[in-house]
């Protein structure tokens, strides 16, 4: 997945996918866990890093994890909703 090092941070009910871009600059996609699925509620990339496909890399990381771990994804964040529309091959992961 690109040249980005993506890490997943998990709490008891919330988590996020993160890419450290530079000291003090990170891209993130946040979610909450509920009923065997994650509900993606926010994607953020610093303005100076927009347009490089970074947010899509975060979404792809969650897709890979969903396939590997057997959970579904409910996109609430408008960006992620659009990406699911653009990638019909992900439809089986929608919850």
Image: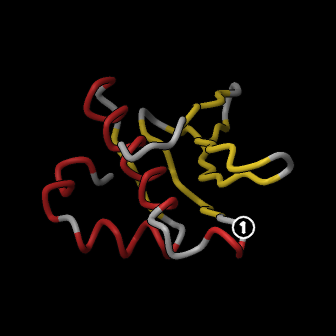
Task: Estimate the x, y position of residue 70 in percent, counting from the top left.
Answer: 29, 28
Task: Estimate the x, y position of residue 30 in percent, counting from the top left.
Answer: 63, 50
For residue 81, which quarter of the picture? bottom left
Question: Compared with residue 72, is residue 40 higher up or lower down, i.e. above or below?
Answer: below
For residue 94, which quarter of the picture? bottom left
* Residue in the picture at 21% in, 54% down: 90
Q: Regarding mark 1 in the picture, which secondary structure is present there?
A: loop
* Residue in the picture at 46% in, 36% down: 35
Q: Residue furthest right?
A: 24
What is the number of callouts on the image?
1
* Residue in the picture at 21% in, 65% down: 87
* Residue in the picture at 42% in, 42% down: 62
| Depth check, front residue: 61 or 49 | 49
Residue at which label 1 appears: 46
Left-right relation of 51 to 94: right
**Quarter placement of the N terminus:** top left
Task: Estimate the x, y position of residue 39 in percent, counting from the top left.
Answer: 51, 51
């Amino acid at each position: 997945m690109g040249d980005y090092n993506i890490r997943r941070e998990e709490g008891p009910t919330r988590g996020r996918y993160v890419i450290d871009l530079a000291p003090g600059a990170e891209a993130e996609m946040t979610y909450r866990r509920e009923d065997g699925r994650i509900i993606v509620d926010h994607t953020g990339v610093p303005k100076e890093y927009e347009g490089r496909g970074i947010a899509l890399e975060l979404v792809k990381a969650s897709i890979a994890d969903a396939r590997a771990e057997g959970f579904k994804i409910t996109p609430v964040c408008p960006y992620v909703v659009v990406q699911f529309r653009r990638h019909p091959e992900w439809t089986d992961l929608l919850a």
